[in-house]
Amino acid sequence: MPENAPVWAIVVLPVALAVAAVVTAGFDAVLSGAAGRGHAGGIRRAGRRAATPVREALRLLVQQPRRTTAADRLLGRLGVVLVPVAAVLAGAVLPWGFRAVSDPSVGVVWFNAMEALAWAAVWLAGWGPNSALSLISGYRFLAQGLAYELPHMFALTTAALGAESLRVGDVVAAQEGVWFVVWMPVAFAAYLLSALAMAFWGPFAHPLARDAAGGAAAELAGVDRLVFLGGRWLLLVVTAGFSVPLFLGGGHGPLLPGWAWTLLKTAAVLALLVILRRALPVLRMERYMEAAWMVLVPLTLLQALFVAVVVLNR
Amino acid sequence: MDGWQPMLVLLGVVGAGLAALYGLGLWLAAARTPLEAGPFAGGLKPGEHAVSRFHVRWYPVTMIFLAFDMEMLFMYPWVKVVSEVGTTAVVEMFLFLGILFAAVAYAWREGALRWT
Amino acid sequence: MDLRAFLRRTAMSRPAVLVVTLPGATRLRLEVEAELRRREWPVVGAPAAADLLVVCGDPAAQGAWPEWLDDIERSMPEPAARAVMGESARVGGALDAGRGEVTGRAVAPRGDGGRHEDRAAPSGDGHHRPADHAEHMDHAEHMDHHASHMDHQDHSPGGHMDHTGHMDHAGHDMHAMADIAGLPMAERADDRDELRLDRLHVPIGPGLTDWPTGLILRLALQGDVVQGVEVDHLPVPPAHRPPFWDEPWLRAARGEEVTRGGAARRRCAAHLDSAGRLLAVVGWDDVAAPFRRLRDELLAGASRTEVAGEVHRTVRRVGRSRVLRWSIAGLGRLPADTARAAGVSGPALAATGDAYDRLLMWLGEIERGLEVLDDTRPLAPDDRTGPRGRLDGPRPPSQALLDVLPDLLTGVEFACARIVVASLDPDLDELALAPVTGAAHA
């Protein structure tokens, strides 16, 4: 039976997530550098590119705070801060091996509730600065939410259905033999898509797109910008990491201890997302909405039906 | 419900971390007084304040979403009792989902999922 | 050395750059982009994120010193500086000077008071910004003072909401009572379905990234739908040299010796530039970036064997992407007869279709151009077809592209509007070819 991690884990978790976010962003920077500037051609140059996120963070710390004319500062700031808060709180139910900071009986619902805060966060950050381009971009995320949220919830429910429990620890325990990804591949794929969408990253980065001068982040400078964009990487790490206990067997695996398997699998999922992102342009919801509702929703529904039938006959 | 105490502590830790980050920013910033700037849309000044009643043309989708999303909430407790209740639980749930999806398909045919 | 200064200096070792290009400075823009890529400095799209404003072109040639340029600079948080690349400027040196200024301002902050008054232009050719900005500072304080009233006056019903007739002039003649912090709130107007909805007037450009140099679109937005468009642009100064992208054909027309290979090289680079811009707007940096790198390698004189492999690979990658096709097909449809009637020639006419068709047309011309890159025969003097169309028509090809914009942009979403503009990619430098007609100046 899974149990809560010791108290010090509460302090370690945010730090560990931040380190994972920096490493992921560094890997992404190395790949982007190779595409834009040619291959690094040397460990030192690649290392310098990998350090880009750290340098960027320092640069933003040195910037003067900034606000726009007649801005809604309270709501804008709230939106900015909400992104990392939602990410870390959602991360509380992430099992590290077999122990999470907390493993409530409704852990899956807690995760869902926390990542749904991103809706509020991006919209508030877009509304706050009183700037047309960031306002447009904030609303882009709402449309995105309408498209990704249902397949996402069906994917979550399907995994919980396989374990007949909403406790994350039980979901992991149910995968001791066969990982859920084996008999729920559609739910896994839908989950990964929605993980990208809720982290508004990669092909789902339209709310922060270049065509709107940075979108919801267009007017953010200094620490605000760092918190918002850094929080986005945290959110990506947490949502990608949550696919491990849901579908990839959590800490289960031969030879290595549970925590090592969790780490390996999370790194693999993140690497996969960072690499696959390169193959796609940014998706606009105007086109994606129809595909999400008429393809992803029925597919995930059929997947849930299949799992329900299996559960009945088990 | 001691499962929630760690969450509260975690919220405190994150809050402290963010406060420390803002503090570090103040210490390092090249200027501490916030800069007051106009909104950016390429350099020229806008005609009005941007805060306004924003016209979303995907409004019908929000309605469909609300209906479906409410239903999703039933599914969470449902997963815990599927094998307990047996076949009726699955039949009832998927009949319900089927009806809802029929409505979505109708809305789609009416063009509610496209707005450009 | 104290830790704080060290961290500040380290932070600004690679300042984030916002590049703004003025009409007539395409060559400089390309030089700056190549140099920034070589230095691996971050390039950003908004002043909030930027440390260094790089202006390509001579602002003084805009007539009066452009105020919008100062506005952009004023909205950059400290440490911030400006580097102006005049015609004769050495790009590397000017960037170094800019970084020096940014680092200096970071390490030795000058207090928080009148921050912008003493910010001199660290430019290569020494244009100093006008000193009399006092009135703007006063204005800013005025805004500050009124900002707190915002929440109370915000959505008050009735009041000033019913002046439909004034819609298009909002912001000019309504200064008296409805203003908050110097600006009125949005008013309602009919949309295409005759719903009365809040309408915003937002001029976009010329400081946007991945945007045709100097273009200004005055948009009327309802939600993110473009309800009305007015095409405008920065003054295009009469050039003493031909537009960069049309140079080989215009020089050949003047009887100078230009090889077919040289012309093909310029055409390939122009299309790589346009396609890179479109792909950046679409949000596919992973192919936009190599396109831009290959463009610069071509312009630097790379031989066919050096670039052909990667060009073909990247072009194939773009052409094979079904997601890209699904994403932009159907946007900005321009049938041949409409295009011809507007005077469009070149790829936008030949593509006879949407944004995706125009992209494919560019890609095809790039691949065909590579085949003749080493052709040393002279260009026929009657070959006047530049990258954007026929240069011997009554009007420059880009003028026709600008003329079709209002019809294509009305009623589409903001994101689609940006894609449509990028898929036509008018080159405003060409407007100096002929007398500019019907364009009010910013």
Image (spheres, coloured by chain):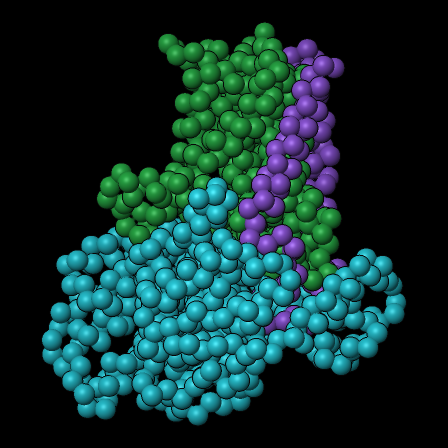
Give the quadrant of residue C388. bottom left
Determine whether C136 is above or below B110 in the image. below
Name the spot of residue A142 as percent of width and height, x first. Answer: 64, 48
Q: Residue at x 40, y 28 (%)?
A: A268
Residue C110 drawn at (x, y percent): 57, 59
Identify the residue shown where x is 60% and y is 21%.
A10
Please state which of residues C5 and C391 is positioned toward the viewer in this rendering.
C5
Residue A223's x, y, as percent?
58, 46
Instruction: Locate residue C278, reporting x and y percent.
Output: 42, 62
Quarter of the image with the N terminus of chain A in it: top right
Residue B91 shown left or right of residue C6 in the figure: right
Which residue is situated farthest in the left direction here?
C376
Left or right position of C371 against C40: left
What residue occupies the far top of the structure in this picture? A1
Label the green chain with its letter. Answer: A
The reply to whether residue C201 is visible in this rendering is no
The quarter in which the C terminus of chain A is drawn is top right
Q: Which chain is cyan?
A: C
Q: How many numbered callouts?
A: 0
Indicate left or right for A149 with C266 as reference. Answer: right
Q: Residue at x 18, y 63 (%)?
A: C302
Most foreground residue, A103 or A280: A103
Location of residue C384 by image quarter: bottom left
Horizontal relation, residue A4 to residue C5: left or right: right
Say which chain is purple: B
Compare residues A265 and B33 and report the one nearer the observer: B33
